């Protein structure tokens, strides 16, 4: 039988102010074609189906329209879908009775049975085109402390996860017949995995951020992982895989090889794992690739031919949701209050969407857009210092000098205006 492993769709996601339903629609249309052309038996979706716990009606509509069309295109298709840390466990399971009519299973949380976890809910039979069971799937959602058995240990969270996977494996092993494989889904950060820092939400529970791959029994034929957006093997093992996200969810993922994985099973083991690259429907541009002086950057923006850069000469005639996203990278040796206005003027009438302007101070050794701060400018300092003092220290950190009188006066004026508005409200 053939499985297709995907995860981290993040339906409903916006890149800054730009919503991305067009890109998700293009991906889902490609996925429908792939399910049919590859004659996939089971679709595995390993969490973060939605971008947030309260997805829009449009995002939910995209998912359920896709699931319906998938069964129409591949009538024998089985679907197993688990919740990630971005998803609402309860919301994922609300349509379960209707999904069952499509042979689709959505697991949002572990559930209880008596004094323990409902293992029958977590272990799902996987059938081939003839309806014969070929494998059993441990469909594990993102695990919160309330989902886990209580274990007396130095780290109860890690111990609880290991114990739950062990229980689920034992249950699956008891159900299977000779020649049937066991597959596991997990939405978690496995130790050693490469992280996309701009778009992956850190999971820190009980002081633990990552799990060891040993939580998966070595007799599990394939582990389909979600959460990390970069496609990668865990410890180099081709049967323990992150498939990665189907879209670049931030500019830190501009060079990621977005893909799905086709997994072939034979006689209870993995016979092949094949990577299928996902076409990128909307380009991401960084101008320049490394921050440059403002005058040079503005000149590059004014002269660039966006259509030629992305191989779309007809781009000006296309709807805006097909225009590339742009990150502008500038090196500054002094503050530029009119920076955004200058950049927007250079981009006038160009078919591109400006997402972000990243600035780097000339004396800095790395990007400094205000997102990386020393401890003395952390959240505690923000709470303790008055706004003007904090602003002065932040400016000093970013530009290596105290704010000029004009900028300090402008900040004070802004602060007073904000205070006055609050008082009137």
Image (cartoon, rainbow, N blue to C red):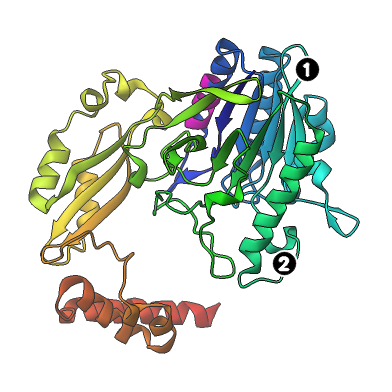
Instruction: Name which residue lies at 36% across and 83% down.
Output: 387
Could you tell me if residue 210 is visible in this image?
yes
Q: Quadrant of the C terminus?
A: bottom right
In-image side of 276 versus 184 (left or right): left
Instruction: Name which residue lies at 11% across and 66% down.
Output: 363
Give percent across and percent down for residue 393. 26, 81
Q: Foreground: 92 or 219?
A: 219
Q: Quadrant of the N terminus?
A: top right
The magenta region covers 23-30
Under tag 1, what secondary structure?
A: loop
Q: Is residue 185 magenta?
A: no
Helix, strand or loop for the magenta stretch, by majority: helix
**Disc with the residue nearer the chain's start (2 vs 1):** 1
Which residue appears farthest toward the right when viewing the image?
A: 114
Give percent across and percent down for residue 314. 30, 18
Q: CA distance from mark 2 to mark 1?
A: 37 Å
Marker disc for residue 271: none
Q: Quadrant of residue 153?
A: bottom right
Give percent across and percent down for residue 353. 33, 39
In-image side of 328 versus 256 (left or right): left
Q: Quadrant of residue 311?
A: top left
Could you tell me if residue 11 is visible in this image?
no
The residue where tag 2 is placed is 151
Q: Is residue 28 magenta?
A: yes
């Amino acid at each position: 039988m053939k499985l297709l492993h995907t995860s981290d769709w993040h339906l409903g996601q916006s890149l800054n102010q730009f919503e991305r339903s067009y890109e998700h629609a293009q991906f889902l249309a490609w996925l429908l074609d792939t399910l049919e052309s590859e004659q996939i038996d089971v679709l595995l979706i390993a969490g973060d189906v939605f971008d947030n716990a309260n997805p829009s009606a449009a995002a939910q509509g995209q998912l359920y329209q896709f699931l319906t069309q998938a069964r129409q295109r591949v009538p024998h298709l089985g679907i197993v879908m688990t919740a990630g840390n971005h998803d609402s466990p309860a919301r994922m399971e609300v349509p379960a009775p209707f999904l069952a009519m499509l042979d689709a299973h959505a697991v949002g949380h572990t559930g209880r049975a008596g004094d323990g976890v409902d293992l029958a809910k977590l272990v799902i039979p996987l059938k081939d085109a003839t309806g014969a069971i070929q494998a059993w799937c441990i469909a594990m959602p993102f695990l919160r402390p309330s989902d886990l058995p209580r274990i007396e240990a130095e780290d109860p969270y890690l111990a609880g996860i290991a114990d739950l996977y062990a229980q689920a494996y034992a249950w699956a092993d008891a159900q299977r017949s000779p020649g049937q494989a066991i597959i596991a889904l997990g939405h978690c950060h496995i130790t050693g995995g490469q992280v996309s820092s701009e778009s992956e939400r850190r999971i820190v529970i009980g002081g633990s951020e990552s799990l060891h791959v040993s939580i998966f029994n070595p007799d599990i034929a394939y582990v389909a992982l979600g959460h990390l957006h970069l496609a990668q093997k865990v410890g180099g093992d081709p049967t323990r895989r992150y498939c990665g996200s189907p879209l670049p969810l931030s500019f830190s993922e501009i060079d990621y090889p977005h893909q799905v994985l086709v997994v072939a099973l034979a006689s209870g083991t993995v016979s092949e794992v094949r990577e299928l690259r996902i076409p990128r429907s909307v380009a991401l541009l960084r101008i320049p690739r490394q921050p440059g002086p403002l005058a040079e950057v503005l000149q590059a923006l004014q002269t660039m031919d966006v259509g030629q850069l992305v191989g779309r000469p007809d781009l000006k005639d296309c709807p805006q949701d097909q225009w590339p996203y742009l990150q502008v990278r500038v090196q500054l040796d002094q503050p530029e209050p009119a920076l955004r206005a200058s950049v927007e003027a250079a981009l006038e009438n160009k078919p591109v969407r400006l997402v972000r302007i990243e600035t780097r101070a000339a004396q800095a050794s790395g990007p400094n857009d205000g997102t990386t701060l020393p401890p003395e400018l952390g959240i505690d300092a923000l709470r303790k210092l008055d706004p003007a003092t904090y602003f002065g220290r932040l400016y000093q950190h970013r530009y290596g000098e105290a704010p000029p009188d004009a900028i300090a006066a402008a900040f004070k004026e802004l602060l007073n205006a904000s205070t006055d508005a609050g008082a009137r409200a």
